[in-house]
């Protein structure tokens, strides 16, 4: 970390308020990544500095955080952009933002926990205590969100600090005290910040893409005032947590033992509001931005998917698994990405399997299976990844898509995979005189004639037919619509018809 400005010793960063103002103003015009790295260092230094009064420490921590917010907003937009940054750039962005949020939230949480229970603070600190609690909870929920962007591992200590900060707010009678959060409109309260973080953690973010996680958080923010938090269980509160434990929110399916720090929560009236918003959006295709504060860049299709996901998890009885699982233990060869899937199905994988990954199947059901990934290679593993999978001892391949990712360690993960086809095949399609490869996942249904085909992005076009030959007979595929879009593929529905051979 660079030395403190204006001659201040490292033991007293920003000892002179004029130095603090000068440095923070200079960083406002700096490159966002450079600024965040510097501000991260200052958060760490202020948190550990000796000789600072509690009030001065809090003042500095909050001032540094306010200076960081514009840079964090710009870097987050880059990270979540429709065109993904390169893997190296994406990792650099994530690492810088997460490091800052960790230093900032640790500093604020540490300042809170240093307060003696029941002690009377001096007026400067007493007056800023609601703001410190709100900013601590806000920083911790954002830090946890960024861990969800990578599907974990989720640091349990972050949930512990989050729960303790809210417990302190209740203990001081400040749960509904209002304070501003830099970079966000209006004021918030400890109760609202706690519910925003808890509700996001409760809705299975490990089954959403990072862009959808961010959008879910925005939707949660606009409805948080309607959420319900109680000290005892109620029929329409499907989640709980223990403020005395370092734990994420839990579903009532795992009922807790009674205790004074248990809190139960749910969507309350927000579920009805969300359902109505989804109905209007589905009917009109238009988003009333003035009433949602979600931002002009929101894609209505993605928003509809997020609303359905939230509505399912906000219901009194969150979704259960549709298929019974059976515990198994076997090896699984895995190829990922559209081109690798095509090569694997064509028998193009190297004989020694060097271009394949080896996973372990842990359970199977009619709809898919769960697997553990002992060594995550690269950053490709995320919700929506297309896979070709071959169980140990099997001759043929299965094609599936990742629906859930939970990292248990930096290079280890557990995944949930939906099976798309147990008998996939590669086909060469004629498209306006050109040839295009696709993966036929489901041939034309006997009654509807509907087929499902995986193609490279941009190949599907409304009204553009595909032709191929199967078993000596011509087949015509008339486009019906896109089922799903991934990073390097599209799943499209077609009506299969007899065509010219």
Image (tube, rainbow, N blue to C red):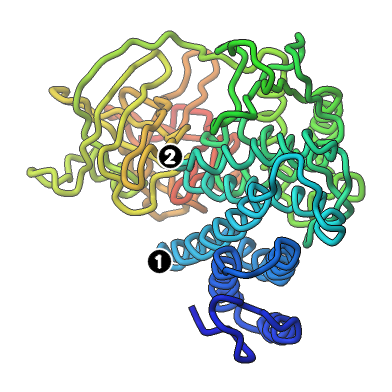
- Tell me the residue at 42%/34% (across/down): 401
Q: Under tag 2, what secondary structure?
A: strand
Q: Is residue 395 above or below residue 191?
A: above
The reply, left or right, for residue 374 in relation to residue 466 is: left
Q: Under tag 1, what secondary structure?
A: helix
- Tell me the residue at 32%/22% (across/down): 422
Residue situated in front as seen by the camera: 482 or 473 = 482
Residue situated in front as seen by the camera: 489 or 27 = 27
Q: State which quadrant residue 400 falls in.
A: top left
Q: State which quadrant residue 51 falls in.
A: bottom right
Residue situated in front as seen by the camera: 9 or 18 = 9
Q: Are marks 2 and 1 in contact (CB under 8 Å)?
A: no
Q: Residue furthest front?
A: 119
Label 2, residues with CA under 10 Å away: few <14, some 14-19, many ≥20: many
Give the CA distance from mark 2 to mark 1: 28 Å
Q: State which quadrant residue 217 falls in.
A: top right
Q: Nearer the viewer, mark 2 or mark 1?
A: 1
* Dot placed on the residue nearer the N-terminal end, 2 or 1: 1
Residue 44 visible in the snapshot: yes
Tag on residue 88?
1
Q: Position of residue 151 (x, y in %)?
A: 47, 42
Q: Position of residue 325 (x, y in %)?
A: 39, 11
Q: Is residue 297 above or below residue 118?
A: below
- Tell me the residue at 16%/25% (across/down): 392
Q: Is residue 219 above or below residue 87?
A: above
Q: Residue furthest bottom?
A: 6
- What residue is pinned by disc 2? 454
Q: Position of residue 364 (x, y in %)?
A: 34, 16
Label 1, residues with CA under 10 Å away: few <14, some 14-19, many ≥20: few
- Tell me the residue at 73%/53% (across/down): 135
Residue 82 visible in the snapshot: no
Quarter occupied by the C terminus: top left
């Amino acid at each position: 970390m660079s030395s403190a400005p204006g001659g201040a010793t490292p033991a007293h960063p920003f000892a002179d308020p004029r130095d603090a103002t000068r440095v923070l103003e200079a960083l406002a015009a700096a490159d966002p990544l450079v600024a965040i790295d510097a501000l991260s260092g200052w958060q760490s230094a202020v948190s550990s500095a000796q000789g600072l009064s509690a009030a001065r420490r809090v003042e500095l921590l909050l001032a540094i955080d306010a200076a960081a917010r514009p840079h964090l907003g710009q870097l987050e937009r880059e990270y979540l952009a429709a065109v993904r940054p390169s893997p190296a750039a994406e990792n650099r962005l994530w690492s810088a933002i997460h490091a800052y949020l960790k230093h900032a939230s640790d500093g604020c949480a540490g300042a809170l926990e240093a307060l003696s229970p029941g002690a009377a603070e001096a007026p400067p600190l007493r007056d800023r205590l609601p703001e410190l609690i709100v900013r601590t909870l806000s920083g911790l929920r954002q830090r946890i969100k960024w861990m969800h962007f990578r599907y974990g591992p989720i640091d349990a200590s972050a949930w512990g600090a989050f729960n303790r900060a809210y417990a302190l707010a209740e203990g001081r009678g400040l749960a509904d005290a209002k304070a501003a959060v830099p970079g966000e409109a209006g004021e918030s309260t400890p109760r609202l910040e706690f519910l925003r973080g808890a509700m996001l953690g409760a809705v299975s973010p490990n089954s959403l893409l990072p862009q959808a996680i961010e959008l879910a958080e925005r939707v949660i923010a606009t409805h948080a005032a309607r959420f319900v938090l109680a000290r005892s269980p109620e029929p329409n509160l499907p989640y709980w947590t223990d403020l005395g434990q370092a734990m994420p929110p839990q579903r009532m399916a795992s009922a807790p033992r009674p205790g004074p720090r248990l809190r139960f929560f749910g969507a309350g009236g927000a579920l009805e509001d969300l359902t109505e918003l989804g109905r209007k959006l589905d009917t009109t295709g238009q988003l009333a931005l003035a009433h949602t504060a979600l931002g002009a860049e929101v894609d209505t299709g993605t928003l509809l998917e997020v609303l359905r996901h939230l509505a399912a998890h906000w219901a009194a009885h969150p979704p259960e698994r549709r298929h019974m699982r059976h515990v198994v233990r076997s090896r699984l060869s895995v190829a990922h990405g559209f081109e690798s899937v095509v090569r694997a199905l064509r028998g193009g994988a190297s004989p020694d399997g060097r271009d394949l990954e080896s996973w372990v199947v842990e359970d199977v059901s009619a709809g898919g299976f769960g697997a553990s990934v002992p060594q995550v290679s690269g950053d490709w593993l995320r919700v929506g990844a297309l896979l070709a999978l071959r169980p140990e001892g099997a001759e043929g391949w299965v094609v599936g898509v990742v629906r859930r990712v939970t990292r248990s360690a930096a290079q280890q993960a557990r995944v949930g995979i939906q099976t798309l086809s147990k008998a996939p095949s590669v086909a060469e399609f004629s498209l306006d005189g050109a040839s295009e490869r696709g993966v036929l996942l489901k041939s034309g249904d006997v009654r509807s004639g509907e087929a499902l085909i995986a193609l490279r992005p941009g190949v599907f076009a409304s009204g553009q037919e595909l032709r191929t030959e199967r078993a000596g007979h011509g087949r015509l595929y008339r486009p019906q619509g896109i089922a799903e879009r991934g990073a390097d593929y599209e799943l499209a529905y077609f009506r299969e018809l007899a065509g010219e051979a």
